[in-house]
Amino acid sequence: MTAWMLLAAASLQALAWMAGGWELREGNSCPEEYWTQPTADTLIGMSRTVKDGRTRSFEFMRIEARADGIYYVAQPSGRPPVDFKLSTEPGAELAFVNPGHADHLKRILYRRDGENGMSARIEGENNGKAFAVDFPYRRPSSAASRCGEVK
């Protein structure tokens, strides 16, 4: 293993706190994320928003180590990937920035909030106007999320 691969593996291990399921209950809407345990080069994730018992949106994500840094790669609704480079040290607070793409998202932030909390935030611009959306996730109360529960 090369020196940068060892460094990348150690960096991704610092993100192990993200692994597992996360959800946010907002009335009849439930955004949720799932992340795998990190390997030497990736964490794999997916998210979806369930509303009224139906999936309203979904996204495939990964955090990967490359020779020039660590990247969050987003594929909302299965569209082509968009890269966001980690601009902070790996740890309990993460900031990923969009390195020059025309996508309206500019930053994706994650912060560990104790053992059972994770805050995510997206920031960007729509038609020149800044916006931000916060997702104060919690671990589900059981092993299986209730977001997609059919009643």
Image (spheres, grey):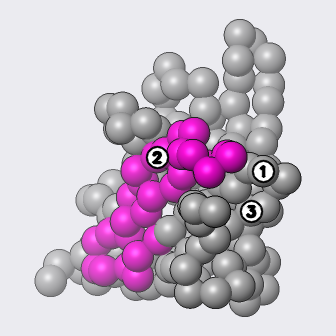
C-alpha distance separating marks 1 and 3: 11 Å
Q: Quadrant of residue 87?
A: bottom right
In percent of width and height, residue 143 lies at 56, 87
Magenta residues span 35-62
C-alpha distance separating marks 1 and 2: 20 Å
Q: Nearer the viewer, residue 8 or 80?
A: 80
For marks 1 and 2, the one nearer the N-term is 1
Foreground mark, 1 or 2, reads: 1
Residue at the limit of the structure toward the top, as seen here: 127
Q: Secondary structure at mark 2?
A: strand
Q: Which residue is mark 3?
A: 24
Depicted 115 relative to depicted 41: above or below: below
Res. 110 in view: no
Kind of residue at badge 1: Asn
Foreground mark, 1 or 3, reads: 1
Depicted 95 relative to depicted 36: above or below: above
Rendered residue at 80%/17% (across/down): 129
Q: Which residue is mark 1?
A: 28
For marks 3 and 2, the one nearer the N-term is 3
Say left or right for 33 vs 23.
left
In percent of width and height, residue 89 lies at 58, 69
- Picture disc at residue 110: none
Kind of residue at badge 2: Glu
Q: Quadrant of residue 144?
A: bottom right
Which quadrant is home to the N terminus?
bottom left
Which quadrant is home to the C terminus?
bottom right
Residue at the limit of the structure toward the left, as seen here: 1
